[in-house]
Image: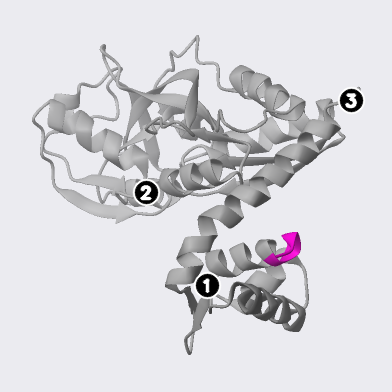
Amino acid sequence: MEFHQLRYFVAVAEEGSFSRAAAKVRVAQPSLSQQIRKLEAEVGQRLFDRLPRSVVLTEAGRCLIDYARQILASVGDARRCVDELKDVVAGKLAVGAIPTIAPYVLPELVGKFQNHYPDVMLEIVEDVTEGIARRVEAGELDVALVSTCQQTPSLRRGPLGNEPLLALVPEAHSLAKKTLVELDDLKSQRFLLLHEMHCLSQQVHHLLEARRLRPEIALAGSQLSTIANMVAAGIGVSIVPQMMVKQQAAPGCVSLPFAPPVPERDLNLLYNPLRFQSKAAAAFRQEAAAALSYEDSSIAPNAE
């Protein structure tokens, strides 16, 4: 059982395709398929069922996958530990972020980080919280920017602060000229929210339920930019993160702060405390903490 075989095995399991896995690990598909067959011969069982349009793990494959991920993570940790003997902050750093943070924070944060630490090779992954957490636990990601996430023995949250949430309404809306809004002002409105796989959608639902508000949900979208366009078209209103309003223009919309108590979401850096934490990971945590500081969280109404 060889290291590269396990790497190919995990790639096929995650991609559900030999061709996509080969592209991911940058090897010719025939070579990858041959190594998978050798691995199956060594363990004495088929690891994948080859279906017409996909491949799925067999029972033996499901048994092996967690061990394979642990081995890959451990080897990665060993390499990083050796790299730490160097004087410079260097090596590979895999960073994850959820979709309601990634487009608003990562471009500037990654740019500054690379300027400060040019010898660190960054790999960026964007995924919903569930996918990010799984990758952190598996050792595929060193750190990740998330909001809420349940802690486990292999998942630890590093608090980065709290971010205000804002109401987003059409420019012609009756609330658009208000200085502050109350949640109750939105009780009769049609709401445009992200799909429930996004933690922001869950947070907004909990926020509304706490006030016993059950508005009509007109759309469950996959991107905040789509939500903003729908708001601009007058289809409904939404509740969005402050960073979206600050970093991305929303023509046709007005963002309004809430009256106290201001609804907020947590911002956290997620990591696996059981894994080796490199200098690069520590440096990224410091850069992220500075980038996501919301000590001055006041924001004026913003007509885009």
Mark 2 is surrounded, within 10 Å at the Cα level, by few (under 14), some (14 to 19) or many (20 or more) other residues, namely many
The CA distance from mark 1 to mark 3 is 38 Å
User: Compared to 18, does 151 lie above or below?
Assistant: above
Residue 88 tag number: 3
Q: Disc 3 on helix, strand or loop? A: loop
Residue 167 located within the stretch drawn in magenta: no
Give residue 183's quadrant in the image. top left
**Residue at numbered disc 1:** 16
Which residue is painted at 83% across and 27% down in the image? 84
Residue indicated by mark 2: 227
Which residue lies at the image location 24% right of the left edge and 21% below the top edge? 181
Magenta residue span: 1-5
Local SS, label 1? loop
Residue type, numbered disc 3 = Val
Q: Are marks 2 and 1 in contact (CB under 8 Å)?
A: no
Q: Amino acid at mark 2?
A: Ile
Tell me if I can see residue 54 in this picture.
no
Q: Can you give x and y, in whole percent of width and height, for residue 177 in the image?
A: 29, 25
Q: Residues within 10 Å of mark 1 (few under 14, many from 20)?
A: some
Residue kind at label 1, given as amino acid type? Gly
Horizontal and vertical percent position of residue 227: 37, 48
Give residue 211's quadrant in the image: top left
